[in-house]
Amino acid sequence: MEDSPGTARTAERLTSSATPPRSSLRRNFLLTTWLAFALLYGGAISAQWLFLREQALDDVKEHALALTEALRMELGEKVNLSAFLSRLGEPASYQVFNRVVLNKVGTLGLLKVKIFDQDSSIIYATDPELRGIHVQDDEVTEALHGEIGQGLITSDVYTRKYGQPTEQTMTETYVPLADTSGGRAKFVLEAYHDFAGPRAHFRRNAFLNGAVLTVLVALALGLISWVYYRARKLESEVASLTTLLPICAHCKKIRVEHADRPNQWVPVEQYFALIDSVDFSHTVCDECLALHYPPRPAGSQP
């Protein structure tokens, strides 16, 4: 008997519905969602940290430059700033400079200020005990060549560098000071700004962002879970409904539906041969053998 198109379509539908496709995303949607959460949260926190760090560095740079200009304006009215800094070894000049710097430091919100000479020695510091210390510092060397340097300095690094304990993590900047001679600055001003405020702001925002993102991810997970399991349930129901075969109660033929012509009834053997390439071999079960081929009585003729 020739295979009908409707039978082939039904066979194809049954075969495909028996094993519904499952993508790795659907199988592992929880892992995928949490991975997306980690990437989003990590990216947001990293971007925020970089932004706050740059903002803090810009603040200390701006305040250090403002201090430099204030020193030039206030001390340069009487004598050239470079010449004045060269006389910081004199007690009177040191006292005048110290008074001006301490007044400006409080106004600008700076924590510490140092002045280095061309030998990278500290000729002035708001911490008087640091005066006279020679420092091997790449940032000072670069600033002596005219480059403004910036960075974060932790309490441990500061203690190792200057031998003075501190509990603060600070932002620092190095500004070439006074006139240049032969492309090399004569002095370098180093200023420090407290980083505790920006760091506390970062931690607070990180916690708030994490809480908001966690709530959003939890809601998304709930929605995805509902949609996922609902889809799986519907697929299971569709597969069950699709595999229900309309079979004749008397002759046991199976109905094959056609969209363009009347339905067709085909024998069970033909139907399963189409969808599963199953070949039937006909034999007789024990009950039918006893019913249709009962044992002959002894002595009866065949």
Image: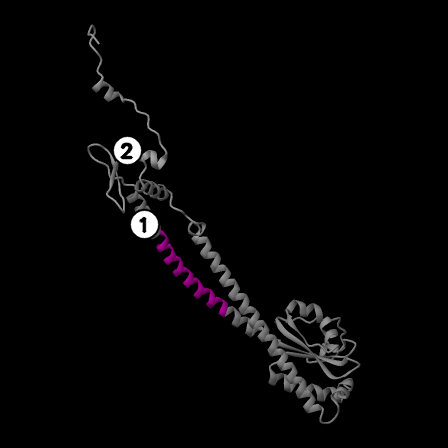
Q: Earlier in the sequence, mark 2 or mark 1?
A: 1
Residue drawn 65% across the image and 84% down it: 67
Please state which of the two labelled residues, at mark 2 or mark 1, is closer to the viewer.
2
Quadrant (top left, top right, bottom left, bottom right) of the C terminus? top left
- Establish if 230 lies above or below 122: above
Q: Name the residue under label 1.
A: 234
Disc marking residue 268:
2
Relative to 83, is 53 on the left or the right? left
Real-space Cα separation, disc 2 to disc 1, in angstroms: 28 Å
Magenta range is 205-229
- Establish if 294 lies above or below 60: above
- Establish if 48 lies above or below 123: above
* Element type at mark 2: helix
Total numbered circles: 2
Instruction: Give x and y (percent) for residue 104.
Output: 64, 86
Residue in front for this viewpoint, 270 or 196: 270
